[in-house]
Amino acid sequence: MSDVELDFRAHYVALVARKRLYGGIMLAIFALLMISGFMLADSRNAGGFWDGILNVFDFPADVWADTAPKLDQLPGHVVTYFPSLIETINIAAVATLVGAILGTVLSLLSTRGLARWPRLIGLFRRVMDIMRAVPEIVIALILIFVLGGGPVPAMIAIAFHTSGALGKLFSEVNENADLKPVEGLSSVGARWGQRMWLGIIPQVAPNYLSYALLRFEINIRASAILGFVGAGGIGYELKNAMAWGQGKYDEAAAIFILLFLTIVFFDQLSSHARNRLVHEGGR
Amino acid sequence: MSAMTATNPDLRGFIDTRFARKKLLSIGVPVLVLAYLVYIVFAFDIPGLAGRARIDNAQTLTRDMVSYKTHVTRDNRDGETSVSVEGERKGEYPEGVTPDWVDIAGDTTTIRLGGGQVVTFLPDTALRMEIPDFGTIEARMEGREVVTNLEEPIPDWISLSRARMAITTAEGRVSFTRNRTEVFNYFYGWELFFFTFDSPYHGYAAGEILFGPRIDPERGNIAGSLEDFWHNKMWSHGQVVWALFETILMAFLGTFGAAVISLPLAFLAAKNFTPLGPVRFALRRFFDLFRGIDGLIWTIILARAFGPGPMTGALAILLTDTGSFGKMFSEALENVDEKQIEGVSSTGAAVAHRYRFGVIPQITPVLLSQVLYFFESNTRSATIIGAITGGGIGLLLTQAMITQKDWEEVTYYIVLVVLMVMAMDSVSGFLRRKLIKGE
């Protein structure tokens, strides 16, 4: 009896020891990858990390030095750049809207049980994978070359990526939808569009909305970045303000403040709205 | 029954209002969306877009994506004729070697463009072009002026001025000035993708290189061809692979660095682990601040201190994600099941053990899956940040785009970026399944 017990115990201890060993090896490999990765990145960087770390505050200090004497002009700059901020937010909003509509269609077409053409589910999934994988900057830069600068290239680029990203999340939501309303609707002869619009959309709308809000927040950041490569909005103004160089950073400071406040505002708004949606949607 | 009739009017009113609201919503929301889109059409000046769009740019882009041109150039000052792909030095045919549609014999060069069109460079800065169904165009330089046999009206595919003649046909293009005579011939495909002309392996099929006799006496076929492919001057595959690696490195260092930093901070910001309100509050605001300063702003600030490169990109991702992870991790920590911790502490475990055995096993799957999701999406962000900080594939992509002529390289990079992101997708999906579900 005690022999068996001992056996169990020894086995258990051995198991734990092995698990710890594996865990330890994994941690060691991870630490090694991180350290060697940082060393490699450091060696391929123009300036070294240890030289640069002392200068991290140089740029903020420069900006502050330019802004402090002209603090009274700051509200004026904020007002000047407000329209381009609106443009950035509009780009994100339209892109999210268009992306959500396209994503809804794509997700319905690629959910088993709901798809219009069940054979093409795989195709629509691959299409979404590719749309998701294309970074916004690629499409934006190509469209800037063809359409010229401005908000439209950024909007199309972000909408393209958003449809893929939201389509995937939406189709996960769709999988959990109750199919009874769809059956009911098809028994009275509803077409596919009607079945989806009346049977599925009301069920999944709160979850869709919560994902779309999260995406909107991400898209505001993306739209600011795309502005920096020439697609209009606050990012473009920031690039110009930076190009004026030292001594004139007060306008850049105003843009930093605007961008920061916008992101914080929509971050809080969307997390508040999502909390409410998820709690109400659960009822 | 009586109770039901009593509540009936109430219920009826309630349902009526709900229905009215629903009707309003189902009409109001689409109307609002439509109104917003109409506003956007004017705010973004979409009607004016057609005027601003450069259709010719789109044509250049699509043509260049799938084809390339070979230049035959004669420098009219010294009479030297050269043949090169895309007119680049690195694509130049070696001395004495020409494609089969070009014959160089002394001062005379014959170029067969296809479709029966033949261009001949004649001595003394003269040119002859035979075009079926049109005739023969002859041109020569007299002093500083172009003299041709063309008569009015000159067709619109020929542009003729005093100093320059340019002919564009479906087969190619000819340009003739005092300094140089140049012919462009278009071909489908990506030129010199595997080997440039200076490699001994140029022009061999894959089977010949793999299984055939040794081509370059100095090196083995496989090693030699790989080396020449890697150092291909036209496409620089080696550099591209490095750039892809750099992009992944940025995403990796940024994401996992942020996770390592924010884990202990998240404990300090979670209600059930840190009773000190002010510490929690300060940390929460710190997370909000780091998240609120967008990756773009971090990139600008850091690029000033560290200069362009992958380190800057990695740090920008790291700082933004520290804010996001701090928030997400502390929320996950607040949702842990207290029972496991109680169980561990009932055995008399120390604080560290309580965390190690009571908390970490609970949250690891949740946190790891979040981190892997971020890793995946940061691969894409790293491409974008790389374009601004000057590192990785993002930089190559923007550089190739800014020149506005190497669209085939742009296409190549885009394909690689999409493949990279999809590969990262499947790697992180695989790891998530492996680590979380323990398959």
Image (cartoon, coloured by chain):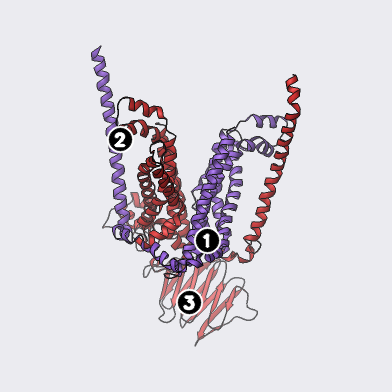
Chain colours: A purple, B red
Q: Sequence order check: which comes first, mark 2 or mark 1?
A: 2
Q: Is residue A275 left or right of residue B152?
A: left
Of labels 3 and 1, the one closer to you: 1
Dot 1: element: helix
Of labels 2 and 1, the one closer to you: 1
Quadrant location of the C terminus of chain A in the rendered image: top right
Q: Are marks 2 and 1 in contact (CB under 8 Å)?
A: no
Q: Is residue A193 left or right of residue A220?
A: right
Q: Give the CA distance from mark 2 to mark 1.
A: 47 Å
Q: Point out residue B403 in the picture as x, y percentages from the top left corner.
A: 46, 66
For label 3, the residue is B181
For label 2, the residue is A23
Q: Point out residue B313 in the picture as x, y percentages from the top left corner.
A: 39, 55
Residue B86 visible to an observer of this rendering? no
In the figure, residue A68 lies in which quadrant? bottom left
In the figure, residue A53 lies in which quadrant? bottom left
Residue type at tag 3: Thr
Quadrant location of the N terminus of chain A in the rendered image: top left
Q: Which numbered disc covers residue A234?
A: 1
Q: What residue is drawn where x is 56% and y is 53%? A: A92
Considering depth in this image, is B77 or A275 the residue closer to the camera? Answer: A275
Q: Give the CA distance from mark 2 to mark 3.
A: 70 Å
Q: Chain of mark 3?
A: B
